[in-house]
Image (spheres, rainbow, N blue to C red):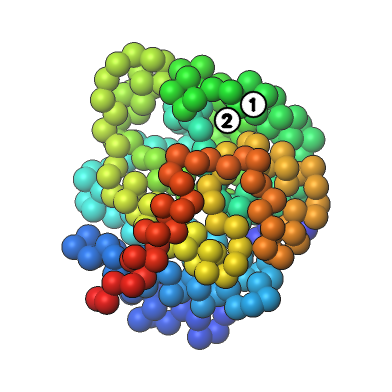
Amino acid sequence: MAARLAPAQDGEATTDAKDSFLLDQSNPLGFFKALHRGFGARLAAPVQWEQVQALLQQAFDAFERNVAEPADCGGAVACHGGCAACCAIRVAATAPEILLIARTINDLPKRLEIEGKIIDADRMTRRLDPQQRMLAGLVCPFIEQDLCVIYPVRPMACRGHASFDQRACAEAMAGRAGDVPISALHLTVRSLVQNSMQSALRDAGLSWANYELNQGLQIALADNSCEARWLAGEDVFASALIADVSLAEMAETFDAIKAVDL
């Protein structure tokens, strides 16, 4: 089945609603709460995959709209097709992102080849911490000739990693010390969009954690029932959990933000 992101339904994306998804940097909590309401409105029970696709489209659109103007980012980012300098770092992804990418892979002519690359990448990196993984320089299994074969459905983590200096990225990835000038706006928008989406998934009774992408994809590609089981509330990617921040701490933060009266 093709992994196409669902368009907004009639009445779901008015001009006013779209405007509420523009970040006012003096009011990030307001941005979070507006996104949370929009995402939550798409997840009416029982949640179907089409609703999740629409949620992802809304999340990706909100991100892209808010980093679209170079002036707002602090200059023009150096990231472009043909540059895969940072594509050796650990990628964290939510369950919807993993499932969407799995659908995309299943539709690719080189599906078995890519799946083999995912397995190899996971085998070589699973026991490495993020710093060791970066220094190992093992390129993401989706990179072919410095281009990402799943670029349209890449996770929020990839979208939010943007640099102003391509050479500095290459130097850092080679283990040579130096500061990489990254876009704080991309990081901020990624965090707000992804966290508000995770909070909405949690409210809908769906697993909402972050998972290591390659490990999560192996689970999804090996078992066609993963999507239905996740929609039923099962944490099918639990073994790939990234616990840099505890789920309890994240949930407490989400609840505190939702309780703020703006």
Q: Residue at x 60, y 67 (%)?
A: 205
Task: Give the class, few, some or many, for how many residues have Cα within 10 Å of label 1's Cα (few <14, many ≥20).
Answer: some
Q: Quadrant of residue 241?
A: top right
Q: Quadrant of the N terminus?
A: bottom right
Residue nearest the viewer, comparing 148 with 222: 222
Residue nearest the viewer, comparing 132 with 117: 132
Mark 2 lies on residue: 140
Q: Residue flagged by tag 2: what amino acid is it?
A: Cys
Q: Tell me the mark number nearer the camera, choosing from 1 and 2.
A: 1
Residue nearest the viewer, comparing 179 with 125: 125
**Residue 44 percent across, percent down from the top left:** 60, 78
As drawn, 54 above or below 114: below
Residue nearest the viewer, comparing 152 with 135: 135
As drawn, 185 above or below 253: above
For the question of whether residue 193 can be seen, the reply is no
Q: Residue at x 67, y 24 (%)?
A: 123
Q: Quadrant of residue 178?
A: top left
**Residue 71 percent across, percent down from the top left:** 22, 51
As drawn, 209 above or below 20: above
Contact? badges 1 and 2 (CB < 8 Å): yes
Q: Residue at x 29, y 28 (%)?
A: 180
N-terminal label among 1 and 2 = 1
What mark, if any, has residue 40 been given in the picture? none
Q: Quadrant of the C terminus?
A: bottom left
Mark 1 lies on residue: 121
Q: Is 228 on the left-hand or right-hand side of 95? A: right
Q: Secondary structure at mark 1?
A: helix
**Residues at marks 1 and 2, CA–CA distance in whole angstroms:** 7 Å
**Residue 134 percent across, percent down from the top left:** 46, 23
Q: Residue at x 49, y 59 (%)?
A: 198
